[in-house]
Amino acid sequence: MIEILAISGSLRAASTNSALLAALAANAPSDCRVAVYDGLGLLPIFNPDDEGERTPREAARLIGAVTSADGIIVSCPEYAHGVPGGMKNALDWLVSRDAAVDKPAMLVHASARSLYARAALAEIVRTMSFALCEETFEIALLGKKPAEVETILGEDANRQAMRDAVQGFVDFIRGRQVDRPPPRPFA
């Protein structure tokens, strides 16, 4: 069973990014489980002085969730042509850890207009040494009311497209697991 952690870069109650991730989780293929991280708004602002023994509880929960996941999926809005502060803060908590190193990551989008944030987020993820899946997934939900979002995400064609996108990411994860040499035993 492949375990995927989904992180929304939006804190809005009616977030289309969060709705997309919930729909991806609900439509995941049977060979994986997608868990949606719900603590973005609880993370304290990153401070390197608070790492190690002083790591705050919510930051430790995020770090543990990323570490134990086989891969992560991120859906993030664009604010002022960039990545929202909450999402960047979450990534900052991971930057000096091994959690991100070679961890498969996929970006999904709820808007066709978030081109600056997409580029910035991809650059951040690559710089942090995530293994970025070049395939992305998008369903245009920007400006839709919650009932419209639910209808769009419930359409059979979109449900199949979500299942296919997650399956493609699972295949990417599995391909990386096969290509990775086994760990060397300690001498």
Image (tube, rainbow, N blue to C red):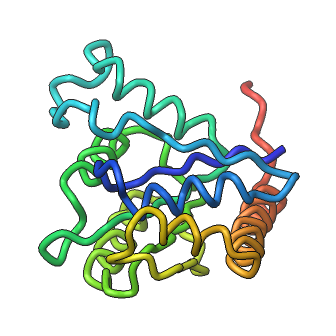
Could you tell me residue 147's position as x and y percent? 48, 64
Asked where in the image residue 134 lies, by quadrant, the reply is: bottom right
Asked where in the image residue 57 lies, by quadrant, the reply is: top left
| Residue farthest to the top, as pictured | 53
Say above or below: 43 vs 157: above
| Residue farthest to the front, as pictured | 147
Left or right relative to 85: residue 100:
right
Left or right relative to 129: residue 51:
left
Say above or below: 108 vs 59: below
Seen at 32% across and 20% down, the residue is: 52
Seen at 38% across and 68% down, the residue is: 145
Seen at 54% across and 44% down, the residue is: 36
| Residue farthest to the left, as pictured | 80
Could you tell me residue 185's position as x and y percent? 78, 31
**Image quarter hosting the C terminus:** top right
Seen at 57% across and 78% down, the residue is: 137
Could you tell me residue 20's position as x and y percent? 52, 63
Could you tell me residue 126's position as x and y percent? 42, 67
Which is nearer the eye, 51 or 22? 22
**Image quarter hosting the N terminus:** top right
How many marks do you count on the picture?
Answer: 0
Say above or below: 175 vs 85: below
Which is nearer the eye, 178 or 169? 169
